[in-house]
């Protein structure tokens, strides 16, 4: 590993870090909020993350800028909240999608297949460190959140990977998941916030809506749902036309819930901003959008003074060596243990 002191000035400002294995090429943007901008299969050239990340720029967003004015691409990290958090206590005030995407991160270690970055929140006294390693067709993310204060601190963390999609792509959850809690549905298309929604088919009046199948961008729909208290931390998105998949694994003792963002051109609401077409599978510590809501529900983890919260997430790309069918991926999800 090279230390940051040995990196040239160009590598510390705006230059992407490219990690590679024989199967994968991964781009990380330390100066653009630590964003993972690209996960690409080298053989098929399939890009798995939503494009649009700004390379060679330094993020400098103030705390009042909504997330919709960011790149809205690639993979971000949300801490200490996801949606805008406000409340009577200053401890739960935090901006839209948290602090971390708004500023540059610092490189701690780097090699051809690994990069370790660190940064701090400004809303709460928390540090955040992420080590990303690429090996064969797998990515491993190792995380550390530390309370820098002398008092307990609540927090809300969610991994926020926006995946590229095409019509007919499929989402796969553990077979025991039969319903999800609805957090948001544009125009209340499938219900109101807080309702329990059947998975994978949501019954709306006399219509069955297939939530596990990606629609078209012209559908102009957007939903946010949560699978709560998972017994197995594993899920996948299957790229139907490409016969490949991304499998995400996580430990439910640390990340017991999974958020699902299903956007077929139905967000943002601002008419001057390009509509998003993506799916996000978001392992999280609590099934709430805002830290203030998680605190009110007594669901936010409390980090003791000077203590650490460690966890890891893995992503595996299936189909780099041969085509996979949907049935094969579904069976793999059912048979593969969580981390």
Image (cartoon, rainbow, N blue to C red):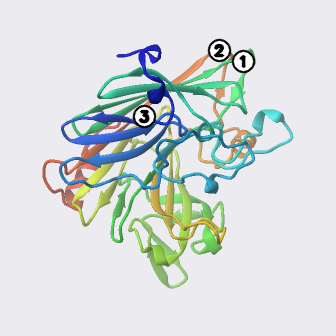
Q: Position of residue 253 (x, y in %)?
A: 48, 32
Sequence-first disc among 1 and 2: 1
Q: Which residue is mark 3?
A: 251
Tell me residue 100's x, y (percent). Answer: 60, 37
- Which label sits on residue 40? none
Dots 1, 2 in contact, CB < 8 A: yes
Name the residue: 73% across, 42% down. 63
Specify few, some or many for label 2: CA neighbours under 10 Å numbering under 14, 14-19, or 20 or more: some
Q: Which residue is mark 2?
A: 306
Crowding around mark 3 (Cα neighbors within 10 Å: few <14, some 14 to 19, many 20+) is many
Query: Mark 1 = which residue?
Result: 149
Res. 110 image quadrant: top left
Q: Residue at x 79, y 45 (%)?
A: 86
25 or 129: nearer the eye?
25
Decide: is 13 above or below 198.
above
Specify which label sits upstream in the sequence, 2 or 3.
Answer: 3
**Label 3, label 1: how far apart the Cα atoms are:** 27 Å
Query: What residue occupies the far left of the structure in this picture?
Result: 322
Q: Nearer the viewer, residue 115 or 333?
A: 115
**Cα distance between the residues tagged 2 and 3:** 23 Å
Where's residue 183, x and y in %? Answer: 62, 58
Q: Nearer the viewer, residue 97 or 254?
A: 97
Task: Give the secondary structure at mark 2.
Answer: loop
Image position of 111 with respect to 201: above or below: above
């Amino acid at each position: 590993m090279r230390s940051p002191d040995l990196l040239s000035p160009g590598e510390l400002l705006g230059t992407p870090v490219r990690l590679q294995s024989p199967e994968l090429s991964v781009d990380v943007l330390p100066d653009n909020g630590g964003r993972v901008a690209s996960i690409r299969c080298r053989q098929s050239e399939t890009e798995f993350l939503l494009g649009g990340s700004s390379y060679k720029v330094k993020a400098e967003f103030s705390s009042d800028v909504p997330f919709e004015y960011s790149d809205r691409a690639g993979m971000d990290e949300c801490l200490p909240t996801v949606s805008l958090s406000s409340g009577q206590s200053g401890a739960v005030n935090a901006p839209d999608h948290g602090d971390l995407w708004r500023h540059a991160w610092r490189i701690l270690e780097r090699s051809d297949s690994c990069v370790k970055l660190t940064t701090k929140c400004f809303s709460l006294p928390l540090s955040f460190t992420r080590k990303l390693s690429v090996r064969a067709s797998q990515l491993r993310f190792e995380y550390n959140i530390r309370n820098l204060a002398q008092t307990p601190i609540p927090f809300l963390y969610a991994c926020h990977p926006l995946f590229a999609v095409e019509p007919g792509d499929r989402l796969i959850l553990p077979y025991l998941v039969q319903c999800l809690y609805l957090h948001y549905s544009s125009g209340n298309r499938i219900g109101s916030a807080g309702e329990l929604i059947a998975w994978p088919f949501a019954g709306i009046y006399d219509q069955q809506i297939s939530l596990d199948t990606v629609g078209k961008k012209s559908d102009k729909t957007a939903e946010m749902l949560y699978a709560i208290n998972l017994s197995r931390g594993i899920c996948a998105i299957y790229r139907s036309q490409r016969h490949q998949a991304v499998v995400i694994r996580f430990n439910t003792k640390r990340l017991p819930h999974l958020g699902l963002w299903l956007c077929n051109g139905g967000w943002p609401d601002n008419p001057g901003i390009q509509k998003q077409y993506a799916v996000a599978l978001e392992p999280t510590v609590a099934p709430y959008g805002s830290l203030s809501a998680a605190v009110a529900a007594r669901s936010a983890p409390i980090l003791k003074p000077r203590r650490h919260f460690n966890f890891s997430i893995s992503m595996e790309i299936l189909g780099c060596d041969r085509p996979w069918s949907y049935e094969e991926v579904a069976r793999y999800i059912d048979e593969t243990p969580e981390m």
